[in-house]
Amino acid sequence: MTATLLLNGTIIDGTGAAPQQGSVLLRDERIAAVGAAADLAAVQEPSLVRIDVAGKTVMPGLIDGHCHISFDEPNSNDELFFHRRNGLAAIIAAENVQKLLRAGVTGFMDADSIFEIGVDLRDAIEAGIVAGPRMSTGGYALWTSVGGTAGRLIPDEGVRGYGKVLNSTAEIVAEVRRQIKHGVDWIKVHVTGVVPRHPLRGEVKSWTFDELKLVCDTAHELGIPVLGHCRGANSIVECVDAGMDLILHATLMDERALAKVIDKQVPIMPVFTFQANLADYGQTVGADPMIREMFRREIADSCAMLRKAFDAGVPLLCGSESGFSITPYGEWHHKELEVFVRDLGLTPLQAIRCATQHNAFALRLKDRTGVIAPGYLADVIVVDGDPSKDVTILGEHERIQQVFVNGRQVPLVPARKRRDPPGWRVSTYGARLSQAVAMREAPLDKPVLPEHEI
C-alpha cells in the first residue's frame, strides 16, 4: 500500500466551495482524507511520501470533455479524412495523449475517433501499456447522408474519417449495437450539419425525431448514454425529447429549447474553445475574417441562454475541441474555463467546478472523480498559484507542478520533437502564383490571397 501526503497547500475541492488550507492524503487509488483528518491519518501510514506544497494549490485534475485525440491537429477536413492511416494514427495518439498529462489533464472524453481507435487507446491506458489520463470514448459519430460539419466531403453511405453514414432504421440499430459490442462508453450523433446555400442561420437538423429517439432507445436498452452535436434551437428540443444524455454546443437556443433543457436538467457542453481561439487569435494564423466573426458571434449570441441554463441548475461541462491545428494538444485545455469566466460571467471557482466535478459525467464517473474528498479517485494536480483568482494560470505549463492519476505521480517529461510521417499532412503548391506575384523582386512575407478575397 502506497500513500502520499500533500501538506500545507490551498485546497480547491472542485465543488465550488471556498478554498481551504490543509493536507490531502492519497492512499492507493483513492483520496483517503482531507484537512486535519489527513494529518491524523498520515501518522498511521508505515510508508508515507510527504510533499510540502506550501504556497501552491491542490485541486482535482482538469477533465477535458471534448478532445479528439486521434486527429493529430489537421488544418482541414481534407487532411483529416484523406491523409490519415489506421495503425499510424493509433501510435501517434498514444504519444499525443501524454501532452494532456503535462497540461494537468487527468481525464478526457473522446466522443468520436478516426478508425475507432479510441476504444483501443482507452484500454491500453487502463492496462498501463500507454501513459495517459483516464479516458472515456465513443466510436464513429453517427451521420445521415445530409452530413455533418464537413458538408459535401461526407459520402452518401459508409465511413469517412470519424463518422459513419446511416440511411435506415435497420442501419441505425445495427450500428449502435455494433459500437456497444466493441466497447464504447458513449454513442455520438451529429444531429446538425452544414448544408450549402441553406437559408437557416447555423446548422441544419439532419435527423428526424423518430430516428433520434431510436438511437437513444437502442443505446439506453444496453446501458450506454448518448450525446448529440447540436447547433440550433429545434435540434436541441428534439434531442431533449428523444432522451439524449448530453448536448454538445447547444448554441442558438430559444426560450422553448431553454425550458426543455432546464426541465430535464440535461447537461450542456458548449465547447467554445475552438471558436474562441479563432475569434481571439485567428488573425495571427491567417484565418478568414468571415469565419472569425461567425464564431465570435456564436459565442456572443449564446452566452445569455447558457447562463440562464446554468443559473437554473443545468450542469455546464468544459470541452476544448483539442486535436485541430487551432487547438493543439497540451495547449488549450484550460481555455474553456477562461471563456466561462469572461463571456458567461461565472466565477473562477464555478468554472473550475465545470471542468472537474461536472465533467466527471463525461467520464461516466459522476461522484467518483473530479472532487477532492475522501473516497474519490485520486486524480489530483498541484498548481503553483491560485486558480480561484485567475483560471488562466492553468494554461501556464510551468505552474503544473505535480500530476497524480489513480494516486500515482506522473513524470512530467517534455514532449519529444517529431516530424510528420510521409503523406500525413495536406501538401500544397503554395500561394496563388499570378504573373504580378512572379514579377515581384522580393518574396512575400505572407501568403497571397486569391484576388477575389483581397
Image: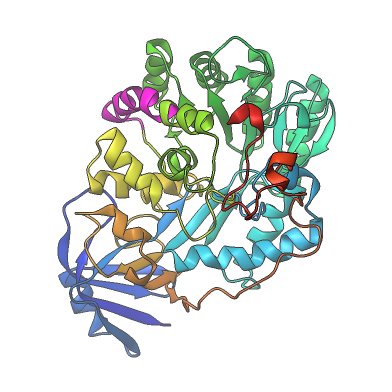
The quadrant where residue 76 appears: top right
The quadrant where residue 103 appears: bottom left
The main secondary structure of the magenta stretch is helix
| Residue 366 visible to an observer of this rendering | no
Q: As drawn, is 403 to the left or to the right of 112?
A: left
* Up-down relation of residue 182 to residue 43 (above or below): above
* Up-down relation of residue 208 to residue 447 (above or below): above
* Up-down relation of residue 199 to residue 75 (above or below): above
Asked if residue 29 lies in the magenta stretch, the reply is: no
| Residue 334 visible to an observer of this rendering | yes
**Residue at horizontal 50 percent and vertical 78 percent from the top:** 413
| Span shown in magenta | 298-314
**Residue at horizontal 36 percent and vertical 80 percent from the top:** 3
Asked if residue 302 lies in the magenta stretch, the reply is: yes
**Residue at horizontal 48 percent and vertical 34 percent from the top:** 292
Specify the farthest residue to the right: 157
Specify the farthest residue to the bottom: 46
Q: Position of residue 264 (x, y in %)?
A: 42, 23
Q: Position of residue 366 (x, y in %)?
A: 43, 47
